Amino acid sequence: MRHFKACLHDEAGTLALGAALARTLVPGLVIYLHGELGAGKTALTRAMLHAAGHLGHVKSPTYTLVVPYVVTLEGRSVEVRHFDLYRLASDEEFLDAGFRDEFDGTRVCIVEWPEKAAAVLQTPDIAVHLTLAGEGREVELYGLSTLGIECLERLRFLPNL
């Protein structure tokens, strides 16, 4: 599946989608999260991380730019990097911070506001677009690589209708 679209009627829908996505995560996966402020990017990431076994707090890395986590995928520990590039002033800032090295094919990288470093970021495996829609949100996921398409094919999610 290259494309998936759903309406998430409330926060529970976002949490359920995050849990479903967590079951598809594999080492090396790169996910970009697009959406305006308050669209649910961090909430979706939090749900993915908790469903993948992270027990602690998951905060937005708006001021630190990246927060590392370790989760268990298929019985093995995998590093996850949660980026929030909202405060980046330039592509060079991303490079100067050494963030490109984090995308090494062994970690899961989840990036909020990827457009802030678009010129130096690789194409993601999955692009997630969240749009506010009344009390909920609409979400579209695009598989942009073989790995991303395989993950979306494993996605088992039925939104509450």
Image (cartoon, grey):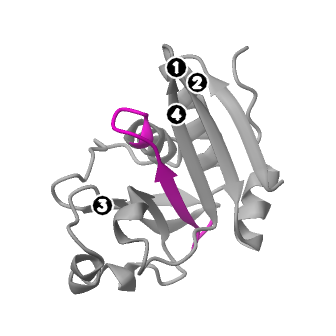
User: Which residue, given by chain and number where applicable, does mark 2 sit on?
Assistant: 13
Marks 1 and 4, how far apart at CA: 9 Å
Q: Is residue 55 magenta?
A: no
Chain-order first, disc 1 or disc 3:
3
Query: Does the CB distance between marks 4 and 2 fall below 8 Å?
Result: no
Give the image location of residue 116, x and y in percent.
34, 64
Q: Amino acid at mark 1?
A: Gly
When asked about the image quadrant of residue 137, the answer is top right
Residue at 70% x, 31% y: name it: 6
Question: From the viewer's perspective, is residue 62 above or below residue 149?
Answer: above
Instruction: Assign a secondary structure to mark 2.
Output: helix
Label 2 with label 1: CB-CB less than 8 Å: yes
Q: Nearer the viewer, mark 1 or mark 4?
A: 4
Q: Give residue 131's mark.
A: 4
Q: Nearer the viewer, mark 4 or mark 2?
A: 4
The magenta segment is: 26-41
Quarter where residue 31 is shown: bottom right
Q: Which residue is mark 1?
A: 136
Residue type (three-letter) at the residue carrying disc 2 = Gly
Can you tell which of label 3 and label 4 is closer to the viewer? 4
Q: Amino acid at mark 3?
A: Leu
Q: Which x, y percent locates residue 58?
A: 31, 44
N-terminal-most mark, 4 or 2: 2
Q: Which residue matches tag 3?
A: 85
Where residue 129 sits: x, y (%)?
Answer: 56, 45
